[in-house]
Amino acid sequence: MPKYRVLMTDYAWPDLEIERSVLSEYDAELIVAPAGDEATLIELASGIDAIMTTWAKVTAAVIDAASDCRIVARLGIGLDNIDVRHATARGIPVTNVPDYCLTEVAEHTLALLFALARKLHVYHAHACSGRYDLSAGLPLERIAGQTLGIVGFGQIGRRVAEKSLALGLHVVATSRSCRNPVAGVVWADFNELLSQSDFVSLHLPLTDQTRHLIGAAELARMKPSAFLINTARGGLVDHAALASALAANRLAGAALDVQDPEPPDLARPPYNDPRVIVTPHAAFYSTKSVDDLRRRAAYQVGQCLTGLVPQSVVNLEVPAR
């Protein structure tokens, strides 16, 4: 019988062979939740030594039910689905994998920017309905020379900026710290960025302060010809306000890889608007990035269970037990 039991709350890949292989090196077995809701996780939490989670919410109640838990490991970067404060109060380290998909998200962001600018979604929809019509996507503007506004200039925002400059875009950025400048990027305050940009791309975490960062007032500051891109967190955007702005033609379109909630009701605005591109939280994914993510998160759990300090502890005030 294995020495440790690890609860996997949810996952987005076909199997769990990588996780099981790594955890077996630490004499740990994986317990897979059939659903990621709070009630199910609470029911399975008794006797669990560690929790691994992708998107399911690891609430205070789940953490309390897992009275033997030594670590909560996020298979991802953001931590808004974990009650980190409560885990800290319980003396439980929380880990993430902060650098696993930086290139993928940057590439997905630029793919969405190109699709919006060249109206690929519009042409594809018309082609699928039997229409072969150049005028359906007009006007089309040259991408080089337009302005991309990057909100949040962490590791992903920086990569988006570097790639965008190489494509001939003007790049303006805003962040809380204005650190890690990139040559050629112009710093602007948030409102200036919104009014100047032809594309606004979000690259910041979801917190109480950033929820609905893009609302009716912010959308009103954007150019009617501008596009909004969100590959960060769905809660950064007030989707009702976005739907209203699109209905009033105060925005040219949007590309949303993240929604609130997930999955959203695709039959409702703004998701059913032909000017909106929706991808299913896919920006992080490549075979290489996900394999790396899974392996590193599982090793973090194994390290903690065997008395080592795992990599990428986000609540550093809590030592590994």
Image (tube, rainbow, N blue to C red):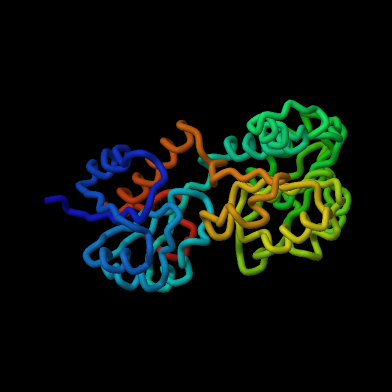
Compared with residue 263, is residue 275 higher up or lower down, i.e. above or below? above
Residue drawn at x 43%, y 63% is 57
Residue drawn at x 72%, y 47% is 254
Q: Quadrant of residue 275?
A: top right
Nearer to the camera, 135 or 194 = 135
Give the position of the C terminus as an image quadrant.
Answer: bottom left
- Image coords of residue 191 (percent x, y): 84, 59
Compared with residue 118, is residue 254 higher up or lower down, i.e. above or below? below
- Image coords of residue 13 (percent x, y): 39, 41
- Image coords of residue 186 (percent x, y): 84, 45
171 relative to 23 in the view: left or right: right
225 relative to 90 in the view: left or right: right
Number of numbered discs: 0
238 relative to 98 in the view: left or right: right
Q: Quadrant of residue 194?
A: bottom right
Compared with residue 237, is residue 196 higher up or lower down, i.e. above or below? above
Compared with residue 275, is residue 49 higher up or lower down, i.e. above or below? below
Residue drawn at x 36%, y 39% is 14
Residue at the extreme front of the image, as rendered: 130
- Image coords of residue 42 (percent x, y): 31, 68
Residue drawn at x 48%, y 47% is 97
140 relative to 271 in the view: left or right: right
Q: Quadrant of residue 45?
A: bottom left
Nearer to the camera, 180 or 85 = 85
